[in-house]
Image: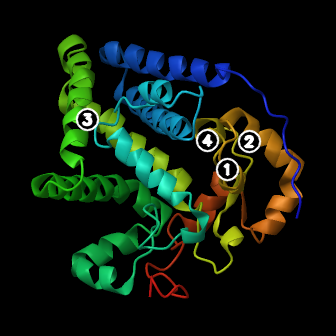
């Protein structure tokens, strides 16, 4: 099947992404500085939006935007507003996720929500219950941030203790970057730590996982493993149009603002390629999976490495 390609723009700087970065960081500085003037029911959704937006900006820089210079892109994206995720680890695991032949494989896809038999048994009864709850959208949003952050930090601490790879260097740099963030939040803005966690970090990740919840499923054909969510008029811009996820996986180098046009030009071919895995907005995703499981926890196991 053939796809209509967009004309390549040879530019040193992608201004839409640069302006987006200014908007996100400017909104973060403004919101944290004036947080006392905002009621919690305004501060929390605003803080969640900022954190989720910046996580998607980080994703954009990982894919080589807004410049052709990797160091410049990293300087734009690496600031840990969410506190818990070192940029270099996010970069390496996400690029590994883009090896599409491994998508959803619990052993080779770092972003898979499936489990191999041995992993599943090792979780124990409580862990299995928490994972099962997260197969619904509501469970993922409520329990997902605590589960993800706690498991990630525990694993990273173990790697640091054992001196695995360059994790000590990564963590040392990450802590310095976090110190810069916290000096502003605590020292300048006077915001208590619990307020930042409760109104920014936790709801921000809770909002961000809405995108990843149903964007992949285990299928034997690689092209059918990646979903599309259409008509995402509010969350689409927040997720930088990665709701059209099949288009992103097919053309990972496309900047966020070109994805909708590429999708419009190739909608029929993309839907044919992904086997019709299309949702009509995130309301459709919620209607189907708010309280109903999206998938079973165990990987189907046609791949012997995962079995």
Residue 179 placement: quadrant: top left
Q: Earlier in the sequence, mark 2 or mark 1?
A: 1
Q: Which mark is residue 235?
A: 4
Quadrant in which the N terminus is drawn: bottom right
Q: Residues within 10 Å of mark 1 (few under 14, many from 20)?
A: many
> Which secondary structure, mark 2?
helix
Gap between marks 4 and 1 measured at Cα = 16 Å
User: Mark 3–mark 4 contact, CB under 8 Å?
Assistant: no
User: Mark 2–mark 4 contact, CB under 8 Å?
Assistant: no
Q: Is residue 53 above or below residue 269?
A: above
Read off the residue under disc 2.
259
Q: Earlier in the sequence, mark 2 or mark 3?
A: 3
Residue 48 image position (x, y, % from top left): 43, 36
Q: Earlier in the sequence, mark 3 or mark 4?
A: 3
User: Mark 4–mark 1 contact, CB under 8 Å?
Assistant: no
Read off the residue under disc 1.
248
Q: Earlier in the sequence, mark 2 or mark 4?
A: 4
In the image, taking residue 30 as reference, residue 290 lies left or right, namely right
> Which secondary structure, mark 4?
helix
Residue 47 image position (x, y, % from top left): 40, 30
Q: Earlier in the sequence, mark 4 or mark 1?
A: 4
Gap between marks 2 and 1 measured at Cα = 7 Å
Q: Residues within 10 Å of mark 2 (few under 14, many from 20)?
A: many
> Which secondary structure, mark 1?
helix
What residue is shown at x 84% (from left), y 39% (from top)?
A: 6
In the image, taking residue 289 as reference, residue 139 lies left or right, namely left
What residue is shown at x 18% (from left), y 26% (from top)?
A: 192
User: Mark 2–mark 1 contact, CB under 8 Å?
Assistant: yes
Outermost residue to the left: 161
Q: Which mark is residue 174?
A: 3
Gap between marks 2 and 3 measured at Cα = 31 Å
């Amino acid at each position: 099947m053939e796809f209509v390609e967009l004309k390549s723009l040879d530019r040193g700087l992608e201004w839409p992404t640069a302006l987006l970065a200014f908007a996100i960081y400017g909104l973060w500085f403004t919101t944290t500085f004036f947080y006392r003037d905002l009621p919690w029911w305004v501060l929390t959704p605003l803080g969640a939006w900022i954190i989720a937006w910046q996580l998607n900006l980080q994703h954009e820089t990982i894919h080589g935007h807004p410049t052709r210079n990797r160091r410049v892109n990293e300087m734009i994206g690496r600031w840990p507003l969410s506190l818990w995720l070192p940029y270099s680890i996010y970069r390496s695991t996400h690029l590994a996720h883009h090896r599409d032949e491994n998508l959803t494989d619990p052993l080779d896809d770092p972003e898979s929500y499936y489990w191999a038999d041995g992993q599943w048994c090792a979780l124990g009864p409580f862990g299995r219950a928490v994972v099962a709850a997260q197969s619904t959208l509501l469970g993922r949003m409520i329990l997902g941030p605590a589960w993800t952050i706690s498991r990630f930090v525990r694993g990273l601490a173990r790697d640091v203790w054992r001196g695995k790879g360059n994790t000590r260097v990564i963590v040392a740099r990450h802590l310095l970057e976090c110190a810069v963030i916290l000096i502003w939040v605590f020292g300048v803005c006077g915001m208590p730590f619990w307020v930042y966690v409760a109104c920014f970090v936790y709801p921000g990740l809770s909002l961000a996982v809405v995108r990843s919840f149903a964007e992949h499923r285990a299928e034997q054909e690689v092209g059918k493993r990646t979903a599309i969510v259409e008509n995402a008029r509010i969350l689409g811009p927040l997720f930088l149009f990665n709701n059209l996820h099949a288009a992103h996986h097919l053309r990972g180098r496309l900047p966020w603002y070109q994805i909708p046009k590429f999708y419009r030009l190739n909608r029929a071919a993309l839907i044919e390629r992904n086997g019709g895995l299309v949702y009509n907005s995130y309301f459709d995703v919620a209607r189907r999976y708010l309280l109903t499981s999206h998938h079973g926890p165990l990987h189907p196991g046609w791949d012997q490495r995962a079995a």
